[in-house]
Image (cartoon, rainbow, N blue to C red):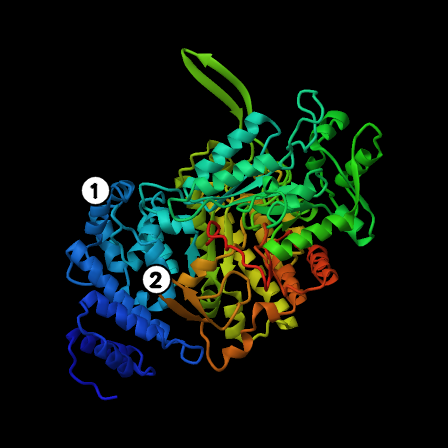
Amino acid sequence: MQTTERVSPKLNRLEGELLARFPQLDISAVIEKTSQQSQHKNEAELDQLLALNILEKITAEEPDWTYAAAYVFLQQLYEETKTRRDIASGYGDFYGLIETLTNMGVYSHELINTYSHEDIQELENTIDSDKDSLFTYIGIKTLSDRYLARDYEGHIYELPQERLMIIAMTLMKQEQADRRLEWVKEAYWALSNLYMTVATPTLANAGKSYGQLSSCFIDTVDDSLRGIYDSNTDVATLSKNGGGIGIYLGKIRSRGSDIKGFKGVSSGVLPWMKQLNNTAVSVDQLGQRQGAVAVYLDCWHQDIFDFLDAKLNNGDERYRTHDLFTAVCIPDLFMEKVAAREDWYLFDPHEVRKVMGFSLEDFYDETKGNGEFRAHYQACVDHEGLSKVKVPAIDIFKRIMVSQLETGTPFMFYRDTANRMNANKHEGMVYGSNLCTEIVQNMSATTVTEEKVEDGKIIIMKEPGDFVVCNLSSISMASAIQDEVLERLIPVQVRMLDNVIDINDIEVKQASQSNQKYRAVGLGTFGWHHLLALQKIAWESEEAVNYADQIYETIAYHAIKASCELAKEKGAYPTFHGSDWSTGDYFDQHGYTSRQWQALKADVQAHGIRNGYLMAVAPNSSTSIIAGSTASIDPIFSKAYSEEKKNYKIPVTAPDLNVETTWYYKSAFNIDQSMSIRQNAARQKHIDQSVSFNIYVHNDIKAKDLLGLHFEAWESGLKTTYYTRSTSTEVDDCESCES
C-alpha cells in the first residue's frame, strides 16, 4: 500500500520505522487502519490503538507481528518516562534516575553509596537500548506491568535495560572494588541478552528499599502449640515480602491423639491447615497476589485421608483448605505395598515418639529395598502397644489420584530417593519440598528453649532449625545453547546467585542462618521445548532423552566448576566437610568417571564448593514469557493462544514458530507422558535438587494408566512430581518460584 500523509505525523514516523525493522510485514495496512480510527485520539491513545491493531495480526502464520507491537509499546514507554524524568528521549541520565528514586525512597541508598558518579556514568554507557528489540509484546508488557520501578503513585520511571542494570549492580555490589564494574557488566550482558532470568523477587525488588530477593522457603513445624503458631507467624512474615512457602506437617499429632495425657482430644493437622489457609489469603504479597503455601504430609500419618480430601469441592467445609496446595511424602515401601496390593498402616506421630522412642519420619531407606525406614516402620506395625489403622495401600493411592484429577494436587515427594541423593545427608534429613517441588534440602523444626524476663524485658531463646531458603535463577536454554555461551554464562550466574545469600535481608532469622549454613542456590533452566524445536528434535524420541542427558550433564559440570572456583576465592560453605561433595561420593553416585569429571572431583575435594545445594529447575512460566521462550522443561499447551487482559486479549505464539519448527511443537496433552518422564529422569541424574515436573493427562484417563505413570516416575528415580494437569482442571502457576 502506498504511504500517504496522515492526520498524525507520529503515525507517519512510526510507519517508516516499522517498515525498516519489519519489511516482511504489511505495516502500511495497519497504519492506514489506525489512521482511519484516529479521530479525536490523543497521542497516548493513538499508540495504544496502533498496538492493538498490530496485536490483531499475530497468528501462528505471522508470529513476528509481536515484535512490531512490542516496538510500538516501547516507544510509548520511552515517551512516558521521558517527560517524567526530563530527558531528551529514550535512555539517558542513569545517575539522575538512581538519585531521583533514592530520594523518593523507592531505591535503597546502597546503590549511590556503593557506586560513584563516574561508575554509574560508565554503566550508563554500557546500557544497550537495542536489546529492547529482543522482547515480544507480552514479554515487555509483563516486565512493564510487574517489575519496572515506579513511584508511590504508580508512575513508571525505569526502562527495561535500566531494571536489568540495577539488578546487576545490586547483585554485584559486594564484589571487590577493583573488579566490581567488570562483574556488573558481565551480569548485565547475561541479563540483557536474555540468556538468563533472575527469580521474581529479585527481578522485582533488586535495588529497592523494600522486599527481599529469595524465591521461596520451607519450614518444619514442631509438634507443639508454640511451634505451630510461631511457624504461622513466620509464614505471614515471609509471605508479605513475596515468598512462597512449603510447610512439612508430618510431626504434628493426628486427630484423636492425646494432649498432656488426655486421650482423644487432639484435632489433628486439618485445623492448623485452616489457619495456614487463612494466612495465605489474608497476608497478600505486596498487594499483588495472595500468599502461596504448600503443605506436606506423610502417607503413613493417620490424618492422610482428610489431608488428601482438603482441596476437594465437595464434603465438609470444616475440613477444606481450598487455597493451600497439598503434597504427600512417599517412601519406597509404600509404593511396593501398592504394587503388591498389600495393606498399609497409619500411625499417630506423637504416639510413635512416646511409645517407640523414635520419630518414624526421621528415617529413610539408605538403599533401594533396604534401610532404616522400613525397619522402624515394621517395628511400629509389630508393636502391640501402638495403635494403628490398617488400610489397603491402593486405597490411599486411589484418593491421591481422585484429588489430582479434580484439583491437580497433591504433589508427590519420593522421600527415600531424595534423601539417598542428598549431598548433605551428614547434616540432616529432607522431609519434604517447597511450593513448586524443585527444592530438596535439609530441614528441621525451630523450637523455643527458654523464655525469661530480664531487666524488665521478655527474652525468648530459640534453637534454630534448618529453615530452607531457595535462591533461584534460570538459563534460557534456546538462546544460551544456540549461541554457545554456557561456559561464560554459568560462572557469572552462580556468582549472582551466591551474592543473593549475603545481601538478602530475611526477616525470619532461622532462615537467614540456614541460608549461610548451606549457601544453597538453585540454578535452573527454561525453554526446553523451544530448544528442541530449534534443534529439530521430536519430543517423543530417544534423541530427546539423550539430548537431555547430554545438556544437563554439561550444565552440571559448569555449575559445579563455577561454585568450586568461587570457593577458592571466597571459601567453601560452612558445612562442606563430611558432605558427599567433600568425600567425592557425589561424583561416584552420579557415575561421573570421565577424566574431565575426575579432575573436577579432585578440585572440589581439595578446595571445596561454595554452595551446598546448586541446581534446581523451577516452573518459570512468567519469567520465560519475559525472555520470549517456553516455560521450564514443560511442553507447550498450544502453538497459538490468547492471554486474557482486562479489556483485550494478547495473541501469543510458540517462540521462533515457522514452517520448520512448527512440526516440533506438539501440545502437552497429546504427548506420551512416559517419554516426558524418561527425559526428566535423564536430567534429574545431573540435578542435585529436583525439578518442577508436571504430568499432563486427559480427564478421562483410566486409573491404572495414571497409576502407571506415577510408578514410572518413582522407578525412574524422580524425587518429586508437581501438578497432575488434566484437561478438565485449571491450576494456578507458581510465581514465587519464578526464575
In the picture as drawn, the residue positioned furthest to the bottom comes out as 2
387 with respect to 208 (left or right) = right
* Image x and y of residue 479, in percent: 44, 67
In which quadrant of the rendered image does the N terminus lie?
Answer: bottom left
Is disc 2 surrounded by few (<14), some (14 to 19) or many (20+) residues within 10 Å?
Answer: some
User: In what element is the residue under mark 1?
Assistant: helix
Name the residue nearer the viewer: 34 or 71: 34
The residue lying at 44 percent from left, 40 percent from top is: 282
Q: Of tags 1 and 2, which is closer to the observer? A: 2
Name the residue nearer the viewer: 665 or 326: 326
336 with respect to 694 (left or right) = right
Q: Say whether residue 350 is visible.
A: yes
Q: Which residue is mark 1?
A: 103
Is disc 1 surrounded by few (<14), some (14 to 19) or many (20+) residues within 10 Å?
Answer: few
Name the residue nearer the viewer: 702 or 470: 702
In the picture as drawn, the residue positioned furthest to the top comes out as 455
As drawn, the label of residue 129 is: none
User: In what element is the residue under mark 2?
Assistant: helix
As drawn, the label of residue 141 is: 2
Q: Are marks 1 and 2 in contact (CB under 8 Å)?
A: no
95 over 56 or under it: above or below: above
* Image x and y of residue 347, in percent: 74, 35
Q: Amino acid at mark 1?
A: Asn
Cα–Cα span, label 1 and label 2: 27 Å
247 with respect to 204 (left or right) = right
Mark 1 or mark 2, which has the lower sequence index?
1
* Image x and y of residue 51, in percent: 29, 71
188 over 451 or under it: above or below: below
The quadrant where residue 23 appears: bottom left
Q: Amino acid at mark 2?
A: Lys
Q: Say whether residue 220 is visible.
A: no
